[in-house]
Image (cartoon, rainbow, N blue to C red):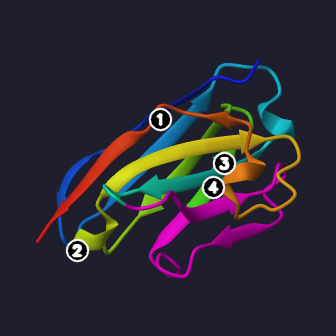
Amino acid sequence: QVQLVESGGGLVQAGGSLRLSCADSGRTFSRLAMAWFRQAPGLEREFVAAITWSGGSIYYGDSVKGRFTISRDNGKNTAYLQMNSLKPEDTAVYYCAADPTALAIRNVGSYGYWGQGTQVTVSS
């Protein structure tokens, strides 16, 4: 069974960095596509980044391209989101998501498993 737990959120000044982690306690992590989404108050959940099970393909949302990096360590059952050059508009709850297929990898509906979310706040 897939169980995702995010960590690493917090408060940071604009221009700073944070690294989010998403750990899976199950046994199928290496066969899952992993993604990060975020949701700010009053807005829809937004695609941030995704990585295929092997790490061979990586995708980013336009608003984070060049600043965020997604990665995974299948030996540790963990996915990461390194966030650099943070902006106040990056403030949101960040969610980790997983799915064995994720056919439309940028779509919220493609993911069957979700973490509880971690708050990221960027002050100006």
Which mark's residue is nearer the viewer, 1 or 2? Answer: 1
Q: Taking 97 as reference, is 83 left or right?
A: left
Amino acid on which disc 2 is placed = Gly
- Quarter of the image containing the C terminus? bottom left
Residue under numbered circle 4:
71
Task: Identify the element where label 4 is drawn.
Answer: strand
Mark 4 near mark 3, Cβ–Cβ under 8 Å? Answer: yes
Q: Was residue 67 drawn as part of the magenta stretch in this picture?
A: yes
CA gap between label 4 and label 3 equals: 4 Å
Which mark's residue is nearer the viewer, 1 or 4? Answer: 1
Q: Residues within 10 Å of mark 1 (few under 14, many from 20)?
A: many
Q: Taking 104 as reference, is 68 left or right?
A: left
Choose the circle earlier in sequence order: 3 or 2: 2
Residue numbers of the magenta segment: 43-69
Q: Is residue 28 above or below residue 59?
A: above
Q: Residues within 10 Å of mark 4 (few under 14, many from 20)?
A: some
